[in-house]
Amino acid sequence: MPLSTLLGTTGPTGFSSKSTAEDVTEGLDLSGKNILITGCNSGLGYETMRILTQRGARVLGCARSQEKAQTACDSVDGLAVPFVCELADPHSVLACVEAVREFGEPIDALICNAGIMAIPKLETIQGYEKQFFVNHVGHFILVRGLLEQLRDDGRVVMVSSYGHTMAPRDGIQFDNLDGEKGYSAWRAYGQSKLANVLFAKSLARKFSEDDTNRIAHAIHPGVINTELGRHMNGVMQAIMSMGKFFYKSTPQGAATQVYAAVHPDAAARNGKYYTDCNIAQPSKNACDPELADALWEKTEAIVAELTGH
């Protein structure tokens, strides 16, 4: 955990680990903007949606079921449109892509917020380890499918984690994406979060080659006691609780992804990794363009295998 987080030190942006999503959007008028967010129904996703709609944005709120998405969108003061997006099901993600396209509005930001963490025992989806599939592959399908909807100055925000540093030493274990050659809950989680950073880096490079002002960032929201830890066993929950004095509140945890998605200062940069609304340095593997390219190529092959797209 960065020392600045523990101390609540204000960084160059003027924000810190104590800043909230409301703080980082103070004075911003987001009227006319369309922002899609996954996992809108709870935790950081819901708080992000609440603040963005409060500032005038229309949020395309994605959740695993129509009921969850509808309930969440109905409960905020502002414009929020529900969409179903089950990241564990590639066909559900493709259906979400099609529904958003049919909605017909250009997108100003895609916030890939939903995820799962530290599943105690190996679980697979479509032959791949569940955390890798949900956290990375599902979002890859969604973002790639909606790039045509993204405005020329649009943003993609991947909610990663400092946990990406817990990935295997070689970064992405391409020969063990099903987990059958060995599974560790935290290494698998770290690998999925490393994939989020690498995906953002790849997008940023591709955007820089286009004749647009699109950008992509990855962020670490902080340690927040949300439903993300629902899969952890009792021992791990006890260990995590030892750090409860360093927990961020949900409004504080949502700040960095909101900053990356809508703050004017974040638009002047591309391909950065943010912690506490300030630029931070990710792991060496996260900055490896060859690893990022290999992951992109492998993920495209996975998607083609499963969906034909």
Image: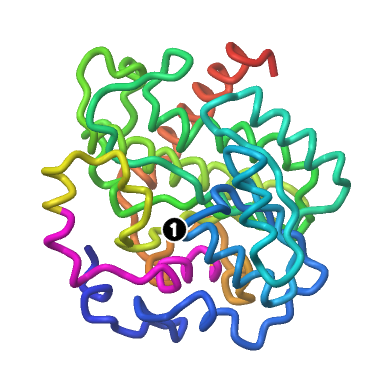
**Nearer to us in this view, 214 or 191:** 191
Residue nearest the observer in this picture, 193 or 101: 101
- Observer-nearest of 75 and 63: 75
In the image, which residues are magenta? 240-259
Q: Is residue 244 left or right of residue 41?
A: left
- Locate residue 292, reporting x and y percent: 46, 36
Q: Residue at position x 58%, y 23% from top?
A: 300
- Asked whether residue 39 is in view, the answer is yes
Task: Please state if 21 lies on the left or on the right of 176 as rendered.
Answer: right
In the image, what residue occupies the spot 46% across and 28% down? 133
Q: Is residue 213 visible?
A: no
Q: Does the segment drawn in magenta span residue 255?
A: yes
The residue lying at 64 percent from left, 76 percent from top is: 264
Image label count: 1
Secondary-structure class at tag 1: strand
Quarter residue 259 falls in: bottom right
Residue 142 higher or lower than 62, as above or below: above
Name the spot of residue 276 as percent of width and height, x first. Answer: 38, 71
Up the image or down, 11 lies above or below 189; here it is below
Query: Residue 173: which quarter of the image?
Result: top left
Query: Where is residue 309 drawn, in percent x and y?
Result: 70, 19
- Residue at the disc numbered 1: 219
Q: In this view of the protein, which residue sits in the foreground, 94 or 272? A: 94
